[in-house]
Amino acid sequence: MDVITSHLNADFDCVASMVAAHKLYPKAKLVFPGSQEKNVRRFLNETGITFEFTRIKSITISEITRLIIVDTRQTGRIGIFNKCLDNPNLSIHLYDHHPDHPDNLKGDLEEVHDVGSTATIFVQLFQERNITISKEEATVMAMAIYEDTGNFTFATTTPADLAAGSWLMQQGANLDMVAQYMSHELTSQQVEFLHELLNSAATYTINSVPVTITRIILPEYCDEFALIVRRLMDMENMDALFAVAGMGHRVYVIGRSRIPEVNVGQIATELGGGGHASAASATLTEQSTVQVEEQLLALLHKSVRPRSLAKNLMSFPVITVKPELSIRETHTTLIRYNITVLPVMEDGHILGLISRREVAKAIFLELGDEPVANYMTTEFGTLPPTATILDIQKLILTHRQRTIPVVEKKQLIGIITRTDLFHMMAGDPALMPGLRNSQNQPSVERTRNVTPQLLGTLAKTTISLLKTIGEVGEACGYTTFVVGGFVRDLLLGEPSLDIDIVVEGDAIHFARKLADHFHGTVRTHDKFNTGIVTLPDGMKIDVATARLEYYDYPAALPKVECSSIKLDLFRRDFTINAMAIHLNPSDFGLLVDFFNSQNDLKDQAIRILHNLSFVEDPTRIFRAIRFEQRFGFELGKHTEKQVKNAVSKNLFNAAMGQRFHHEISHILMEKDPLPAIKRLAHFKLLTFLHPKLKHTKRVQEVLNEAKEAIAWFQRLYTRQQCTLWMVYMLALTSRLKTRELKELCTRLGVPERSAMTLIEQRVAGDRAITTLDKSQELKPSHIYFTLNELRPEGILYVMAGCRNKTSRQAVSLYVTTLSTVTTKLTGDDLRKLGYTPGPLFKTMLQTLLIHTLDGACSAKEDEVRLLGEQFPLEG
């Protein structure tokens, strides 16, 4: 007989894990070894959801041949099922998420993972085996994860728990029901218990760490006592709390900790219980609460570690360099002392940090003679010597800062590296949840499932498309991601159809498979291992192999090699564009963020990924300004410093070409490019487009008028197509001579046809502006023939460039009325009237048009009469 069981006093994780295990062992009986928590009983009684539980009295212990235990491995917590452990040929299968304990069983099969809930383990197994579950099963499993992770707020929460929660939502988990049974309002009696705990609380300082112990005697067992303890801890903002409660013939100890110096799991184990470093419990018999408190105090004095402070962890004295030292000399210092990062110091103050990787790349780019100050990192955190291990963790693990200067009274007194932190914590990894993640994987704080954002932002057809892309990738054996601006815009709440796919595999093979699936077409680029899939509806999907790029010299075109998703994201321009979303079915919606990108989105900051980013590709500067103004963000201080550094090095002359035209035209295609143009002028970037290009007061006036003219034109809803970036380019370059505009087009690599259009519209537009502004009287016919040869871009440029209101009104009249005026008579009509076809026809029709425009002719008869007067037929 197979039996599925859990521990005494079952919570939602026990129930959910038992129900989940039944999917793997459908013939097994579900049996509780003891009671259930109050909320679990209420859920089972009120919802009408029924699971096939068997009463323990119906089980013959000696007949059990396979025991499946979930959410515990401790022999002391499985009650009566202890008795079957000696059954001959008994097979034990274990599913648990709790830390190791001396009392743990050994199983023939063990699925033990360091996650926030045992239900998460079963979700992973279901995904691997393509097992489907009902909405009711999904709901109870969601309750388990929400309860055990404290709604994903406990330190024991992992990315796997978030992904599991997302998957359960997709299976139909009822979040309203989860909220109903996860909300814990205290009863009046529980409030009394809370006050009693508060009044009896005493705080002890052990090794400089405050630990609170409180004691209470309850008239009967309270199965929600842990909830009361958590409420007390939150209410009083305690770092470490132990509650000792006498209930009947037993004494219960509940431990909670927010700090690594107090590992409540270790202490509970010493008392015969167990749990995690942050939450644990123990049950004792034949002792009073006073005796247990004394035993607890003794254990605390033995177990609480002295508070780890920065001054205890830092290295000193610190090797430093001066800002004027060359990159090459800095490299020598790094090698000589075998260190990875050097502080840059001046007059006793720390100016920045420079890493060995940045120095090596600068030397490769032939910048070895540059001063180190040009490429040091200036955005970094410092800590005082009294900073705690949690402060150090936050900078190193959350903000990905590898080296922390320790500063006292503005003076550098020591340095802490990531290696220092890892070495310190290696002896007790339970104190460092962040260490559970590989250094090549995003940390907990930056990894989450964004399926809710996908569902709330994108059309169902787009979500279906993304899922299909992931399924095709899975069939090919590749990991697929949607990357870049699509992810950025999603997190900003803006839907995007600009889908860029990165494949850890052969992108060309994948693109062909994807095109086949959708009956679309594919165009490939073997040199870069990329492809563009065009769907039957015309939608295009860019596909690329995960790759890294390197540059042979500053501003060179990149060389490409195959790589991983992490290195692919690292090659991108800014942190906000360096995120990806998993598309394969097992991880669909899981966000990948290696570079703290979400924080930069939250902080509304544009930051480069490494110090030489603009040296490698100066066009990124223009892109940075475009994104800054589009989103209302700001350049990070260090990024702004690197912009100024790139400008001072005059890197643009060597790099001018179509890439710069691409970036400038994209800036001018923004909804409002004027703020970006001002920023270009602020950084003195316009002169790199052409030495004579200035952002003068008059140029700004023309740009303002161009913006108004474009807005007016768009409100007309005409069918005429207008290339808006050309209008702004004509306005921006309005003070350049024609020859200089040609030079600018050549310098930027503007395509020949576009360059020709710009120059033609500029010459004709300037001529029209002069004509309109100087005319004393503007007849409609005069207006018409002044503007008739211009394209819409040139007409809007004329409207922006005219200095007086009358001239602008004339342009408006042309666009709205005069441009569509025609004569009633045609060439055929002239022939029928007896005129001989020839060059005179053009003069006759033009004469008719002039009189029609100026109001002298309004009907066909008027035109016939006019012809008779001015062009009489002979005879």
Image: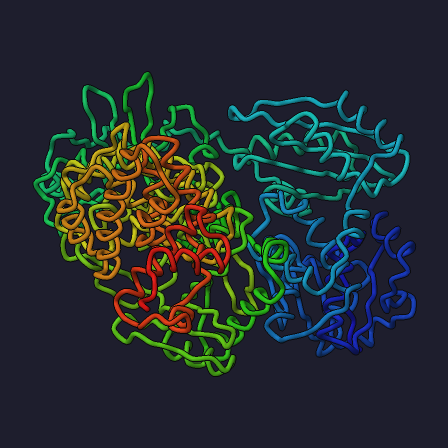
Which quadrant of the rendered structure holds the C terminus? bottom left
User: Image quadrant of residue 546?
Assistant: bottom left
Left/right of residue 124 with respect to residue 418 in the rendered view: right
Picture coordinates of residue 645, whole percent (x, y): 20, 36
Which of the 4 image quarters holds residue 809? top left
Task: Please indicate whether residue 845 sits to the left or right of residue 753 in the image.
Answer: right
Asked if residue 86 is positioned above or below residue 102 in the image, the reply reads below
Residue drawn 16% across the image and 31% down it: 321
Towards the viewer: 766 or 68: 766
Residue 142, image x and y in percent? 72, 56
Q: How many labels does the image show?
A: 0
Q: Is residue 195 left or right of residue 563?
A: right
Which residue is at the front of the view, 557 or 748? 748
Asked if residue 570 shows in the view, the reply is no
Residue 807 appears anywhere in the view: yes
Quadrant of the image containing the N terminus: bottom right
**Of 324 and 515, which appears nearest the observer?**
515
Residue at x-position 69% and y-position 59%: 169
Residue 687 in the image: above or below residue 7: above
